[in-house]
Image: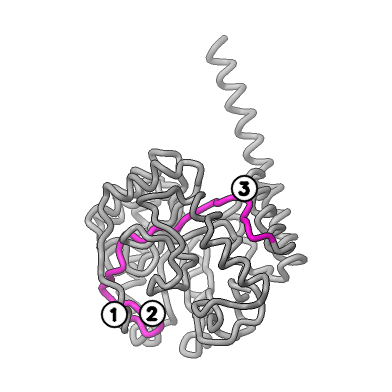
Amino acid sequence: MVAYSTKYKNKKVGLYKSLERHITWNLLSLIAKFYLHKPDLTHLLHIKYPTFKQIFYGIANELFYVIGVAYGAKLNAYNIEITNACNLRCKMCPVNRGMKRKTQYMDFSLFKEIVDKNRGVEFVLPFQWGEPLMHKDFLKMVQYAVSKGIRVMFTTNGTMLNDDICRKIAESGAERITISVDGIGETHTEIRGFDYYKLREKVLNLKNIRDEMKSNLKIDISMVVFNETENDVNRLYDEWKSIADRVQLIPRFVPGRRTVSCRELWRGIIVVLADGHVSICCADFEGEGIVGDARKQTLAEIWNGKKMREYRRAHIKGKFPPICENCSEYETDLVSKRFS
């Protein structure tokens, strides 16, 4: 009788989850197309807001942005920069090309402390500026966050994906891995300084290992769009659509006068740098917009703290702080801007 009851309960949960996925996908499709006017963001929205509860908080954050409230409704996620070191020197990235911040590796003890103090946040991205696989404790960090019921997704340049690391990632519990591919063939090789075809072999190997292990890990391919890569957009989809679970485009950060307030301050995500200081957003590569310290405060406290509210008020009034006033994205019809 107990076994039957458990089986019936599990079946009900499975049906509910399936129905929830179907409804949320359609709802987010409508939001992306008719409200944001950015239908290409549908898949990304569903990754970030896969449940009714998370959509509710996302809509609440958007409402606070629209009506001009200096508070945010709910912190939903955080990027945690476990290192700002990288083994590449990509043309469009400040790392190894003038970044003034000290190169650091976050201690596992600090990572653990941040996860433990912020259990109300369900989504963690353990990367920011730098290559996360260079951190000796990276997989340990992923596994710890997953063990606490946290969804984990991260981005890598893919250069360190050998058999052993691929297997460990596949069994780590990470939900998604995003691999940066900037252009096809020689374009990628020139921009990133790593052979495109070697990277493709590594990604294919990761996919094969994942499939052999029957892992639920999703593999995404991401390209930064700017003048050197935009001609390769169609080829990117053609070459990767049968390999990756998702192919995404993101516009490059470029200098440009800001004219509208930035959604990022209300979106429900915040950035923890390698030393524990917390920045307003992922565009702040030098840590100029520090709003708190994750070693001393919870991220929810920082997200609605005095400094964060000051940034929001400045945007509401159209008096953008120095770090924000010249922040823009590459103009192209191929992909929607993220920070407008």
Mark yes or no: residue 194 visible: no
Q: Looking at the image, is 179 positioned above or below residue 140?
A: below
Outermost residue, top side = 1
Mark yes or no: residue 338 visible: yes
Q: Residue at x 62, y 78 (%)?
A: 319
Outermost residue, bottom side = 227
Q: Is residue 310 magenta?
A: no
* Amino acid at circle 2: Cys
The kind of secondary structure element at disc 3 is helix
**Is 166 placed left or right of 326 in the picture?**
left
Residue 133, picture quadrant: bottom left
The kind of secondary structure element at disc 1 is loop
x, y percent for residue 52: 66, 44
- Give the dominant element type of the magenta stretch: helix, strand or loop: loop
Give 37 or 112, whichever is nearer the viewer.
112
Q: Which residue is mark 2?
A: 93
Q: Which residue is mark 1?
A: 96
Q: Looking at the image, is 78 positioned above or below residue 251?
A: above
Image disc number at residue 54: 3
Alpha carbon distance from label 1 to label 3 = 37 Å
Q: Residue at x 39, y 58 (%)?
A: 80
Q: Residue at x 72, y 71 (%)?
A: 37
Q: Which residues are magenta?
A: 69-95
The kind of secondary structure element at disc 2 is loop
